[in-house]
Image (cartoon, grey):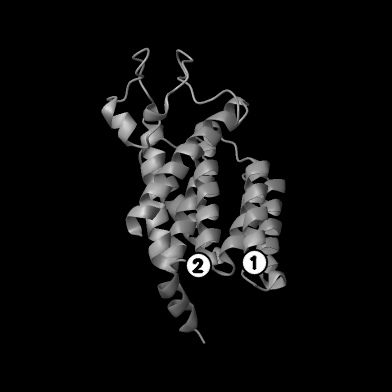
Amino acid sequence: MVGFFFILGTIIGSFLNVVILRSLSGESLVYPPSHCAQCQHHLAPWDLIPVLSYIILKGKCRYCGSKISIQYPLIELVTGIVFVLLYLKYGLTVELAQMLVFASILIIITMTDIKAMTASHIIALVGFAIVLILKIIAGEDILIAFLPAITLFILFAIGCYFGGIGDGDVSLAALIGLALGMLSMAAVFIAIVIGGIYGIILIIQNKANSKKQIPLVPFLTAGCMLAIMLEPQINAYISSFY
């Protein structure tokens, strides 16, 4: 099953690449079919095998020889690894389905934030809707699930109002709260710590610029994934105070 989820992850990662690039360019996700960004030649199925096609083609377009962005195999590989880690943690459960959707949304928005400093409301809301439906299917208490989602939404909305947080991050915060529940608070805390360390490093290297915007979503994504993987340790730490 591990191999299955890795392959599934790389296939989903290939689709995530399409969503990332086309959401930034404004192209439809459906049309035109997959094509080379340089020569516009439609790609054959054997040009689209996750990771392997990039290796076989040596990172170049089969038709015009232009360089293929390393983003393609990287996102495919990362998604495959993330899917395996989530499967090992949750097993074949509805919660696994929730986490796979959640992770996919995080990957998309992380890349759009890095590339263009934008976090799509629509993509976050689509993820929110799918995760909510899966929670209903799993029979979870939706009112309890909404509590951390609403809390983070309000906190990030306040941060957005006073500046420093983009409005797209507010929608993503609600998704994080819904998907992770109370664990989302630990995820945000970890994100703040990582972001703070990154800021200190920039200051030490004299690269910090008060006018330069730094994408927030990569830190939130790192915080979420670490919180998921360290959930037992986090819960044990919190329990030690009771």
Q: Is residue 79 visible?
A: no
Image quarter in which the N terminus is found: bottom left
Q: Is residue 63 visible?
A: yes
Q: Establish if 40 lies above or below 170.
A: above
What's the amino acid at mark 2?
A: Thr
x, y percent for residue 102 = 54, 54
Within 10 angstroms of label 1, few (less than 14), some, or many (20 or more) residues? few
Q: Earlier in the sequence, mark 1 or mark 2?
A: 2
Q: Residue 82 got which mark?
A: none
Total numbered circles: 2
Q: CA distance from mark 1 to mark 2?
A: 11 Å
Tell me what residue is drawn at x 50 percent, y 39 percent.
16
Q: Is residue 112 left or right of residue 154?
A: left
Nearer-the-camera pick, 12 or 125: 12
Q: Establish if 56 lies above or below 154.
A: above
x, y percent for residue 153 = 68, 57
Tell me what residue is drawn at x 72 percent, y 71 percent.
143
**Residue that lies at the very extreme toward the bottom in this rendered image:** 242
Q: Residue 93 got which mark?
A: 2
Residue assigned mark 1? 137
Q: Is residue 55 left or right of residue 220?
A: left
x, y percent for residue 49 = 37, 34
The quadrant where residue 67 appears = top left
Within 10 angstroms of label 2, few (less than 14), some, or many (20 or more) residues? few
The quadrant where residue 30 appears = top right
What's the amino acid at mark 1?
A: Ile
Tell me what residue is drawn at x 67 percent, y 60 percent.
133
